[in-house]
Amino acid sequence: DQQVKQNSPSLSVQEGRISILNCDYTNSMFDYFLWYKKYPAEGPTFLISISSIKDKNEDGRFTVFLNKSAKHLSLHIVPSQPGDSAVYFCAASRNDYKLSFGAGTTVTVRA
Amino acid sequence: EPEVTQTPSHQVTQMGQEVILRCVPISNHLYFYWYRQILGQKVEFLVSFYNNEISEKSEIFDDQFSVERPDGSNFTLKIRSTKLEDSAMYFCASSRIRGVGYTFGSGTRLTVV
């Protein structure tokens, strides 16, 4: 399933700076997009989502941007904190039962 | 905060054996899911379950897999005859609304030897 792609396997950012994670998708039928965060030995934890009728959604330090024409979304974390070090997954759905996940980006926040 | 509970956290089984992975979804959720992640690969959808029946399944979910909600609180995934390639992290999830607002469990690491 190559419908959702996260092309950067890793990202290193200094504490206090902005983390920008990118995600591309190929299926134009996707209408709901989510970001999950995962620590080792835990399940994915929901972070933030966006519907295809919007282009931006903000929740505290997390903002998701959606560019439907480019089939691209991004997650901005500002300011980045050490506790943000984790694997971040982009996921998409067609308002059906299942999520299609990207491969994940490992974020490391340096002190 | 309500959570999805999965047991066991780690299961080792011999190839060809049956294994049952257990999950307790959040109590007021109506939709239940199993996903898996093979080491180094993406999280993949296996099956969704609603109103006591499978609502959607992937091509991975072949005849050796089955799901059940035996008692109104547990949700189980059974693999009848395990293969080496079934080794993976299996995540249960539940949601109140179809396809959104998933809560995932911590996963069961299945190792087939």
Image (cartoon, rainbow, N blue to C red):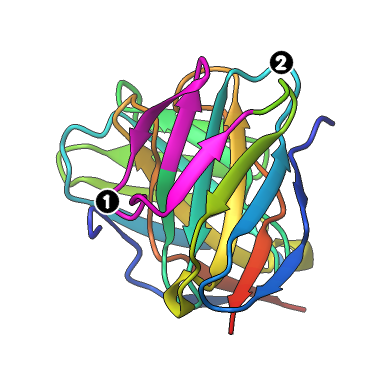
Q: Residue at x 56, y 31 (%)?
A: B32
Q: Position of residue B18 (x, y in %)?
A: 58, 61
The residue nearer to you, when weighing B22 against B101, is: B22
Q: Where is residue A41 in the image (x, y as percent from the top left)?
A: 73, 67
Residue B28 bears which disc, if any?
Answer: 2
- Report the quarter where the N terminus of chain A lies: bottom left
In primary-sequence order, the first of circles 2 and 1 is 2
**In the picture, residue A52 is in which quadrant?**
top left
Q: Give the range drawn in magenta.
A: B47-69
Foreground mark, 2 or 1, reads: 1
Q: Disc 2 to disc 1, how far (Cα)?
A: 29 Å
Q: Are marks 2 and 1 in contact (CB under 8 Å)?
A: no
Q: Callout 1: few (<14), some (14-19), or many (20+) C-alpha neighbours within 10 Å? A: few
The residue nearer to you, when weighing B50 against A57, is: B50
Residue type of the residue flagged with mark 2: Asn
Q: Which residue is drawn at 34% across and 56% down?
A: A23
- Examine the rendering and report whether any part of residue A17 can be seen: no
Residue B50 falls inside the magenta stretch: yes
Q: In this view, does A16 lie above or below A13?
A: above
**In the picture, residue A62 is in which quadrant?**
top right
Residue B7 falls inside the magenta stretch: no
